[in-house]
Each structure stands twice: as structure tokens, then as C-alpha cells.
């Protein structure tokens, strides 16, 4: 397995590198812990999947879907590890949603599930931050899901993982809120890529966020949220007021 990161170099410019077993980053004389990490990719689009865990669908009062439910987040929503999630003035309830995300490695269009693995660069951690009150009142989810800072990604991209055998764990101020295996997805990673790529071309660096398990809940300014996926790492962000 290889871990890929984006970071701020010693000259102050964004750089890319891989992390070795000692924690050192190729292209930098500083270990991983001493670097300012950035979002590990710059997607042209973020394809998200709603209600992909049955228990999550039920906790929102919804019926589990019979086919993947897709929506977009804009690239302007992307933040990286340690960046702030900004609580928007238009919302009175902002929720965390910890998720496994797929990063596309090759241009992907009309790809069947049994070939989807060949188009994946790797996997990362995603927090699908959501203005829950606006999701309930708006006719569609663009505003509720698309605010600036509502797509936290990181800390790295890891290849060679089995996406059906990982565990997602979300904590809020150190208290466990979500803890579930990815095997509980209604539609697996490769099925999602087939379904999405039949509708639109996925470009290198694009992200497919595969849905959140049950346990979603609200955050407030001053809270710290961490999403951890085994084999990848921890993505931590603090919530701040506008």
C-alpha cells in the first residue's frame, strides 16, 4: 500500500508526495507530523451517495433506496485536515457525516463494476458536512450540502485497500458517534462507480463519497470532529462561527 499526501512545502507552495514506513514524506525533509497537510486531491467534482446504509436511511425517516441516490458537492466546498468547518449564517443545524471516499485515478466513463478497480487511485476519509435543516426544507440538496468548507477530505489517499472491509468511526469532542463497517453499504464501491460513470465522466482526482452510516448528529462552533477509517487515518476539523 502507498499513502499519497498533498502538503505545503518548505517554500510555501503546495506539493505532493508519498509517505514511507518511517513517516517521512518524499519531497520534504520534514516528517508527516511536522507538515501542513492539504486536501489530498483537487476534484473537478464530488459525487456523493445518499442513504447508502440502511440504518442511516431509517434514522432520517427515509426508505432505503433501490438504486444509488447521487448528488454533488462543489469543489469550492473542499477543505483539508486541520482546516475549519465554518458554520453558515443560513443554517441552525449543521451535522457531521463520516464516510469512505474513492479518488479516481483514470478518466472513467461507462465503466462496469468488474473493471472499476482499474480506475481507482485510492481511498480517503470524507466528512459530508450537511446543513440538516436546509436539507429538509429545500426542494433539492445543493445549498444544504454545498456550503464552503462542507467537504472535508484527508489526510491521505491510500491504495491497495479492500473497501468492503474497513471501519468508519466518527467522534465529536472525543465521544464516539458513528462506528460501522463498510460492509453494511447497500451499494458497494464498484457498483457506485459503474452507476455514476454511466451518467457522467469521472476525471482523475474526482471524489466519490460512498455514504454515511447511522449516528449522524449536530455540531456547534467550538466542537472538534474526527472521522477515522482503519488503514487510512484520521481527519480532524474544528467548527467555527462565521
Image (cartoon, grey):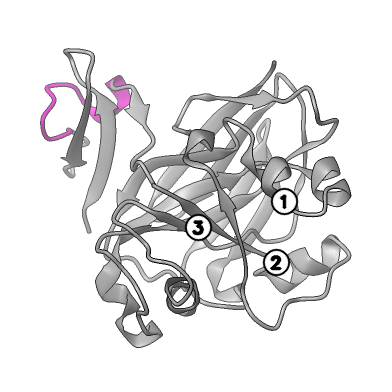
Viewport quadrant of the N terminus: bottom left
Element class at badge 1: loop
Q: Which residues are magenta?
A: 24-34
Question: Element type at marker 3?
Answer: strand
Query: Closer to the N terminus: mark 2 or mark 1?
Result: 2
Q: Position of residue 43 (x, y in %)?
A: 38, 46
Residue 28 in the magenta stretch? The answer is yes
Magenta segment: does it hold 207?
A: no
Front in this rendered view, residue 19 or 4:
4
* Badge 2 density bin: few <14, some 14–19, many ≥20, Cα 10 Å: many
- Looking at the rendered structure, the secondary structure element under dot 2 is loop
Residue named by callout 3: 100
The answer to which of marks 3 and 1 sits earlier in the sequence is: 3
**Which of the marked residues, 2 or 3, is nearer the chain's N terminus?**
2
Secondary structure that dominates the magenta span: loop
Q: Quadrant of the C terminus?
A: top right
**Residue 169 on image: x %, y %:** 59, 51
Q: Which residue is mark 1?
A: 141
The residue that appears at 32% across and 69% down in the rendered structure is: 108
Look at mark 2 in the image and give the residue it sits on.
51
Residue at image point 43% right, 69% down: 163
Looking at the image, how many numbered discs can be counted on the residues? 3
The CA distance from mark 3 to mark 1 is 20 Å
Q: CA distance from mark 2 to mark 1?
A: 13 Å
Q: Are marks 3 and 1 in contact (CB under 8 Å)?
A: no
Amino acid at each position: 500500500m502507498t499513502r499519497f499526501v498533498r502538503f505545503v512545502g518548505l517554500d510555501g507552495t503546495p506539493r505532493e508526495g508519498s509517505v514511507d514506513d518511517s513517516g517521512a514524506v518524499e519531497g520534504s525533509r520534514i516528517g508527516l507530523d511536522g507538515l501542513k497537510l492539504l486536501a489530498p486531491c483537487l476534484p473537478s467534482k464530488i459525487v456523493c451517495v445518499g442513504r447508502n446504509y440502511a440504518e442511516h436511511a431509517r434514522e432520517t425517516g427515509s426508505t432505503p433506496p433501490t438504486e444509488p441516490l447521487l448528488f454533488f458537492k462543489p469543489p469550492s466546498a473542499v477543505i483539508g485536515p486541520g482546516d475549519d468547518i465554518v458554520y453558515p449564517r443560513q443554517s441552525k443545524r449543521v451535522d457531521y457525516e463520516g464516510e469512505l471516499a474513492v479518488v479516481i485515478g483514470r478518466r472513467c466513463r461507462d465503466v462496469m463494476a468488474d473493471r472499476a478497480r482499474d480506475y481507482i487511485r485510492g481511498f480517503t476519509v470524507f466528512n459530508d458536512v450537511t446543513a440538516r435543516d436546509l436539507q429538509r426544507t429545500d426542494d433539492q440538496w445543493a445549498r444544504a450540502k454545498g456550503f464552503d468548507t462542507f467537504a472535508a477530505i484527508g489526510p491521505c489517499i491510500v491504495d491497495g485497500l479492500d473497501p468492503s472491509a474497513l471501519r468508519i468511526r466518527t467522534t465529536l469532542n472525543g465521544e464516539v458517534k458513528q462506528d460501522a463497517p463498510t460492509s453494511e453499504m447497500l451499494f458497494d464501491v464498484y457498483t457506485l462507480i459503474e452507476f455514476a460513470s454511466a451518467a457522467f465522466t469521472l476525471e482523475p482526482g474526482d471524489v466519490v463519497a460512498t455514504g454515511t452510516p447511522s449516528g449522524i448528529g449536530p455540531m456547534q462552533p467550538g466542537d472538534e470532529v474526527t472521522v477515522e477509517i482503519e488503514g487510512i487515518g484520521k481527519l480532524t476539523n474544528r467548527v467555527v462561527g462565521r
